[in-house]
């Protein structure tokens, strides 16, 4: 990863996945004020300058082979409607975890299912990972639908695994293996 620029990944329709840029800071600021994103992801509110700094850290994490974070954005330009990434990367161990959110403008059209599948194929084909997982609160049925529709079977429930704004939540664990695609 360190020697390569971050890829732009095409999606069906009018969206693609591209690296975040400082131009995208307003979308990141907006995400920190969205009630759904705040509830499930607990982002701290950020100023425009803090958003630019966070985007720069994502670029640093790419070069450190720690994460790959993309903007879900219109192919014709404009601000992102969401974020998807592969974090907790363990290249030697062959694993990583998908994370995602959508602003209201991106919700309800199945965008995240396609984005999740595309990032997963990139993880298997380009990074050579063996296992990619998704975790989410059992109280978040939208994330469960995304995981299931993207081909991530439910493996189990992790009790009291993540602290959300309203307390500790049990988390579903979904995963795909590179061999699942055969």
Image: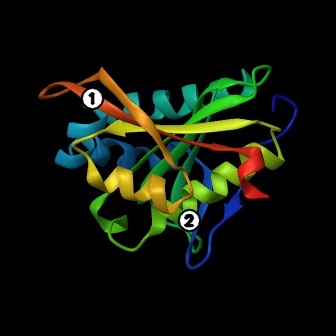
**Residue pictured at 28% horizontal, 53% vertical:** 141
Query: From the viewer's perspective, is residue 151 above or below residue 158?
Result: below
Coordinates of residue 144 in the picture (x, y in percent): 37, 51
Residue positioned most to the right: 3
Dot 1 crowding, Cα within 10 Å, few <14, some 14–19, many 20+: some
**Tag 1 residue:** 170
Of badges 2 and 1, nearer the viewer stands 1
> Where is residue 119 shown, x and y percent of the image?
64, 51
Q: Residues within 10 Å of mark 2 (few under 14, many from 20)?
A: some
Q: Are marks 2 and 1 in contact (CB under 8 Å)?
A: no
Residue furthest to the bottom in view is: 13
**Residue at left offset 30%, top offset 22%:** 159
Q: Can residue 86 be spotted in the picture?
A: yes
The residue lying furthest to the left in this view is 166
Which residue is labeled 2 in the image? 114
Q: Could you say where residue 77 lies in the image, as x and y percent from the top left?
A: 55, 68
Q: Is residue 46 visible?
A: no
**From what the image shows, is residue 75 above or below residue 64?**
below
Residue 28's place in the image compared with 47, above or below, is: below
Q: Going by the image, does 116 lie left or right of 178? A: left
Q: Which residue is nearer to you in this view: 54 or 12? A: 12
The label shown at residue 179 is: none
Quarter of the N terminus within the rendering: top right
Disc nearer the start of the sequence (2/1):
2
Q: Residue at x 55, y 77 (%)?
A: 14
Up/down of 61 relative to 177, above or below: above
Question: Foreground residue, 87 or 177?
Answer: 177
């Amino acid at each position: 990863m360190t020697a390569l620029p971050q890829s732009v990944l095409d999606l069906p329709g009018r969206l693609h996945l591209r690296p975040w840029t400082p131009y995208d800071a307003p979308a990141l600021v907006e995400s920190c004020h969205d009630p759904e994103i705040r509830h499930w992801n607990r982002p701290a509110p950020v100023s425009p300058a803090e958003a630019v700094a966070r985007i720069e850290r994502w670029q640093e994490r790419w070069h450190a082979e720690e994460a790959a974070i993309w903007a879900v954005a219109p192919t014709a330009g404009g601000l992102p409607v969401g974020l998807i990434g592969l974090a907790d990367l363990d290249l030697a161990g062959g694993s990583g975890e998908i994370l995602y959110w959508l602003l209201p403008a991106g919700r309800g059209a199945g965008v995240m299912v396609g984005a999740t599948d595309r990032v997963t194929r990139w993880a298997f084909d380009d990074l050579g990972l063996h296992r990619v997982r998704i975790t989410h609160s059992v109280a978040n049925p939208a994330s469960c639908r995304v995981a299931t529709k993207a081909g991530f079977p439910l493996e189990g429930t992790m009790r009291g695994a993540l602290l959300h704004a309203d307390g500790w939540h049990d988390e579903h664990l979904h995963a795909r293996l590179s061999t699942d695609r055969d």
